[in-house]
């Protein structure tokens, strides 16, 4: 005897829309405010802890001056005009070297990413040169250009070149073959293929490499100025440390940090202007 059981109704899951769906703009503003608050709170907390440790003598304030002392000394040097020549010298070298290195790296990266024979001929040599520590090339540049701006600019340019070259070549090679095939089907010329296919598809990744290169350029110029320069923030840091002026040394370090952040954010801003179609980073989604 067979017992018939009634068929069960399929379960239906009902999900009520949350705040993100109901009020996306408001949710985005709140999330953005939270991100900004966290970004400001963490360094501020560390500075306050440093200030407390210096004033309570938990650390030797002769070696690690309090942030208030560093700020006061930096303000005095800025108002007296003693700080700006070093800042201008470092900025001038970074910008000049970055411009040369970016232009050369981008041009060669496009060429090697587009032409397999060029890539086969040059990639082994450039890979070998890439692993050479760039500061080891400073004596070579001193022999080539002598003392002055030339070695500093050349060192930054070479460092930036490799970062931009690698990111550009990789970005061009990563362009999907379907994009290239579509351009060929529509009869695109080499210039049109570059302008409408390769450039839009590869530029976001290229700009990521350019932003990384911006930070590395600041690091390299500071190290170079400590070795072979008579001005600049790197020379200020090294010279003040030799004279046991630790407050001045930290003023230089803070200026380098501010310069690095400002330069990186400038490249990020330029990247947004050049690639409005690319997704924004740091969780800055569009409302």
Image (tube, helix red, strand yellow):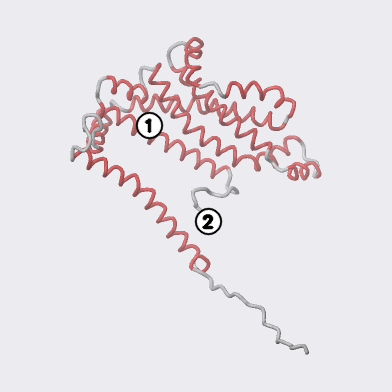
On the image, the x and y values in percent for residue 119 come to 70, 27
Which residue is depicted at the point 69% across and 36% down?
173
Q: What element carries label 1?
A: helix
* Label at residue 172: none
Which residue is depicted at the point 36% across and 48% down?
40
Could you tell me which quadrant the N terminus lies in? Answer: bottom right
> Is residue 155 placed above or below 48 in the rendered structure?
above
User: How many numbered discs, if any?
Assistant: 2
Instruction: Determine the residue located farthest toward the front in the rendered image.
Output: 1
Q: Which of 38 and 194 is in front in this view?
A: 38
Which residue is depicted at the point 60% across and 75% down?
13
Distance between the Cα atoms at labels 2 and 1? 32 Å
Q: Nearer the viewer, residue 12 or 259?
A: 12
On the image, the x and y values in percent for residue 9 come to 67, 82
On the image, the x and y values in percent for residue 141 come to 50, 14
* Label at residue 286: 2
> Is residue 116 placed above or below 280 in the rendered structure?
above
> Is residue 143 placed above or below 46 in the rendered structure?
above
The local crowd at label 1, few if under 14, some if 14 to 19, many if 20 or more residues have their Cα within 10 Å, is: many
On the image, the x and y values in percent for residue 72 come to 23, 35
First in sequence: mark 2 vs mark 1: 1
Instruction: Mark 2 vs mark 1: give the one in front.
Output: 1
* Residue position marked by numbered label 1 in the rendering: 256
Q: Do the residues labelled 2 and 1 touch (CB within 8 Å)?
A: no
Picture quadrant where residue 209 is located: top right
Which residue is depicted at the point 50% across and 17% down?
137
């Amino acid at each position: 005897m067979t017992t018939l059981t009634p068929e069960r109704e399929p379960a239906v899951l009902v999900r009520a829309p949350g705040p993100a769906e109901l009020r996306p703009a408001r949710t985005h503003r709140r999330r953005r405010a939270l991100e900004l608050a966290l970004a400001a709170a963490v360094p501020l907390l560390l500075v306050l802890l440093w200030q407390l440790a210096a004033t309570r003598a938990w650390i030797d304030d002769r070696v690690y001056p309090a942030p208030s002392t560093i700020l006061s000394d930096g303000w005095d040097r800025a108002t007296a005009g003693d700080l700006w020549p070093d800042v201008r010298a470092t900025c001038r070298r970074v910008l000049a070297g970055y411009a040369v290195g970016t232009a050369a790296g981008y041009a060669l990266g496009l060429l090697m990413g587009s032409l397999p024979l060029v890539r086969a001929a040059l990639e082994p040599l450039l890979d070998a040169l890439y692993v050479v520590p760039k500061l080891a090339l400073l004596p070579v540049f001193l022999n080539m250009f002598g003392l002055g701006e030339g070695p500093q600019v050349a060192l930054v340019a070479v460092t930036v070149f490799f970062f931009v070259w690698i990111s550009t070549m990789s970005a061009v090679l990563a362009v999907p073959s379907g994009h290239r095939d579509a351009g060929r089907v529509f009869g695109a010329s080499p210039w049109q293929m570059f302008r409408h296919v390769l450039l839009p598809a590869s530029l976001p990744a290229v700009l990521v490499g350019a932003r990384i290169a911006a930070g590395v350029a600041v690091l390299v110029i500071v190290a170079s100025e400590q070795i072979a320069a008579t001005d600049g923030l790197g020379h200020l840091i090294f010279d003040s440390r030799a004279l046991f002026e630790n407050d001045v040394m930290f003023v230089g370090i803070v200026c380098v940090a501010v310069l690095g952040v400002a330069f990186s954010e400038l490249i990020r801003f330029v990247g947004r202007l050049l690639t409005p179609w690319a997704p924004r980073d740091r969780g800055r989604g569009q409302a």
